[in-house]
Amino acid sequence: MTISANLRQVRQTNHLTQEAFALAIHVSRQTVSNWETGKTYPDIESLLIICQVFAVDLRELVGAIPAQERVNIARQDKRRLKLNATAMGITLILFLGSLCLVAKLGVGAWCLAC
């Protein structure tokens, strides 16, 4: 999709009129209308404000990545988070186990193992 269509989609997804959308990002309603019809394009500052206010990825907004790819990226991120959490959990268990071993055998035995 084009920037124009993506901007319209962001506005409609948030159930806003052009006037309300314009107010939220500090531009005029006519500016929003021109963006949505493709007469003009938002400057980088406006794009960044839209991304921040409406929690939209800049690459998706400008059409660099399709929405489906964003969903795939989100799934991959979830998998990475789960793997990281599992790895951290295992590391914590091993660390606590080694502390218990040190407490039981004494510091000298642990130093010899190193």
Image (cartoon, grey):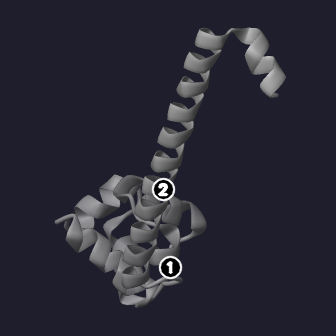
User: Foreground: 102 or 79?
Assistant: 102
> For this view, does 40 lie left or right of residue 18?
right
> For this view, does 63 lie left or right of residue 75?
right
Residue that mark 1 sits on: 62
Residue type, mark 2 in image = Leu
User: Foreground: 110 or 38?
Assistant: 110
Relative image position of residue 46 (x, y in whole percent): 50, 63
Residue that mark 2 sits on: 83
> For this view, does 74 lie left or right of residue 9?
right
Relative image position of residue 85 (x, y in whole percent): 46, 46
Residues tagged 2 and 1 counted as in contact (Cβ below 8 A): no
The correct choice, above or below, for 54 with respect to 4 in the image is above
The residue shown at (29%, 62%) is 21
For residue 34, say whether it is visible. no
The correct choice, above or below, for 103 with respect to 96 in the image is above
Relative image position of residue 107 (x, y in whole percent): 73, 10
SS for dot 2: helix
The residue shown at (37%, 83%) is 68
SS for dot 1: loop
Viewport quadrant of the C terminus: top right
